Image (cartoon, rainbow, N blue to C red):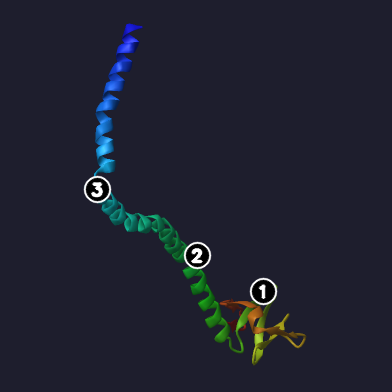
Amino acid sequence: MNLLTGKLWTLLDAATDVAPLVTDAVTDPAATAEAEALAEAVSPLTMVMQFVPFLLIGVLLYFMMIRPQRKKDKQVKDMLANLKVGDRVTTIGGMHGTVTGIRDDNLIVAVGPQGKDKNEMVFARWGIRSVDEVSISNDAETLV
């Protein structure tokens, strides 16, 4: 029991030694002004540092999602603008054919065998998924 009370008195003495220092800092106007100046100087920096992770996430999102999608959209727009008669195309629905005519935003696409039984269909320009770079070689002729 003596050991326990001795430790308790040691802690109380340490607390009474610190108490005047704490009260001096609170009541001393110079210490208070210095603490406020330090808080004001640190405040804008901490506000900026709180937004840095959000800015990094935004930059990462731009370079991994937005920029590649814009690049892909530009390529599709260029491909649709450069369609010409004779191009082999694939539609969004999966039909393969050859462009036989172009009217404003519509394309006439020949589907089926390339003889007298070919079927012509009208598609919107945006309905074309890709231009096929197909070359079919035959003994008699070569299609490019």
Q: Which residue extends farthest top? A: 1
- What's the amino acid at mark 3? Pro
Q: Which residue is mark 1?
A: 92
- Please, is residue 43 above or below residue 4 in the view? below
- Please, is residue 17 above or below residue 120 in the view? above
Q: Are marks 1 and 2 in contact (CB under 8 Å)?
A: no
x%, y% of residue 139? 61, 80
Q: Is residue 76 left or right of residue 20?
A: right
Query: Residue placed at 50% from the left, 65% from the top?
Result: 65
Between disc 2 and disc 3, the foreground one is 3
Quarter of the figure with residue 124: bottom right
- What's the amino acid at mark 2? Met
| Mark 1–mark 3 distance (CA, rounded to whole Å) | 76 Å
Mark before the other along the chain sequence, 1 or 3: 3
Residue 144 disc label: none
Q: Is residue 35 left or right of residue 125?
A: left
| Mark 1–mark 2 distance (CA, rounded to whole Å) | 23 Å
- What's the amino acid at mark 1? Ile
Between disc 1 and disc 3, the foreground one is 3
Q: Which residue is mark 2?
A: 65
- Please, is residue 23 above or below residue 92 in the view? above
- Which of these two is toward me, 9 or 45? 9
| Mark 2–mark 3 distance (CA, rounded to whole Å) | 55 Å
Q: Which residue extends farthest right? A: 117
Q: Secondary structure at mark 2?
A: helix
Between disc 1 and disc 2, the foreground one is 2
Quarter of the figure with residue 18: top left
Q: Which residue is mark 3?
A: 29
